[in-house]
Image (cartoon, helix red, strand yellow):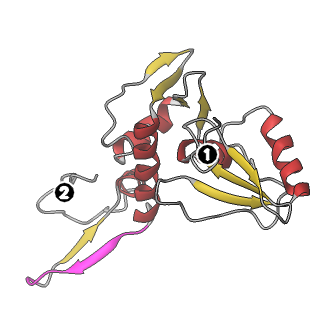
Amino acid sequence: AAAPAAAPSGDNISVSQDPSGQFILQIPPGLWTIIQANNGFAGITPTPSPAPNADGSYTVSLTPAQWQIFQENQNKPPQGPVDGVNITVDPSGRYVLKFHKQHYETLKSNNGFEGITTQPEEQDGVLVMTLDEKEMQQFNENQEKINQEGDDSISVSLLASGDYMLHIPAPLWKMIQLSNGFSGINLSPAPTANADG
């Protein structure tokens, strides 16, 4: 018997048609990331942005014309997204992530791989990681945390002593150091990195 359409597996989109002719797509979380990274919804307006279902998958409804565009987009060669991560799925359903070294180091310093035990292997100057469905979900959650933290904002609080305490995200700290942002200010004690960088 055929499996119910409502339960997409790790590397497959399940597609059904409703009575009105709309195509209903159930997309697993790891594959959703790949579709987004490769502009799978290019040319479809408004761009689908559903909230995740309880199991982490996404449900998208497309008209026949949009479904055609979506299929054509899937046949285009994959492109690495702007931020330097290329994600594909291997035949066993595991997610293969390719990073430029610098991007990998930046993600690592921002806890981008927190909770993931897999270590990258270097291939032709690129770092490659193979993740299972659970690790891919963890990776996605880590990216969301990084994005939510707003890597470009400093939070300031006033201490009881009357001093101001600045909480500076790691990437911004490096930029401030490089541009001598504390020139002429004697930091006492010298700041150390917090657990989150």
124 lies left or right of 165: right
Tag 2: amino acid: Pro
Residue found at x 45% / y 31%: 131
Residue found at x 64% / y 47%: 5
> Is residue 17 placed above or below 113 in the rendered structure?
below
> Is residue 43 placed above or below 96 in the rendered structure?
below
Estimate the x, y position of residue 69 in percent, counting from the top left.
Answer: 87, 49
> Is residue 170 placed above or below 76 in the rendered structure?
below
**In front: mark 2 or mark 1?**
1
Secondary element under disc 2, as helix, strand or loop, is: loop
Tag 1: amino acid: Pro
| Residue 135 lies within the magenta run | no
Lower sequence index among marks 2 and 1 = 1
User: Camera-side residue: 146 or 181?
Assistant: 146
Estimate the x, y position of residue 114 in percent, counting from the top left.
Answer: 32, 43
Estimate the x, y position of residue 10 in percent, counting from the top left.
Answer: 54, 37
Dot 1, how many residues are within 10 Å of its Cα: few (below 14), some (14-19), or many (20+)? few
Furthest toward the top, the residue is: 124
Secondary element under disc 1, as helix, strand or loop, is: loop
First to last magenta residue range: 153-161
- Mark 2 vs mark 1, CA separation in Å: 56 Å
Residue 4 shows which numbered tag?
Answer: 1
Residue ID for mark 2: 191
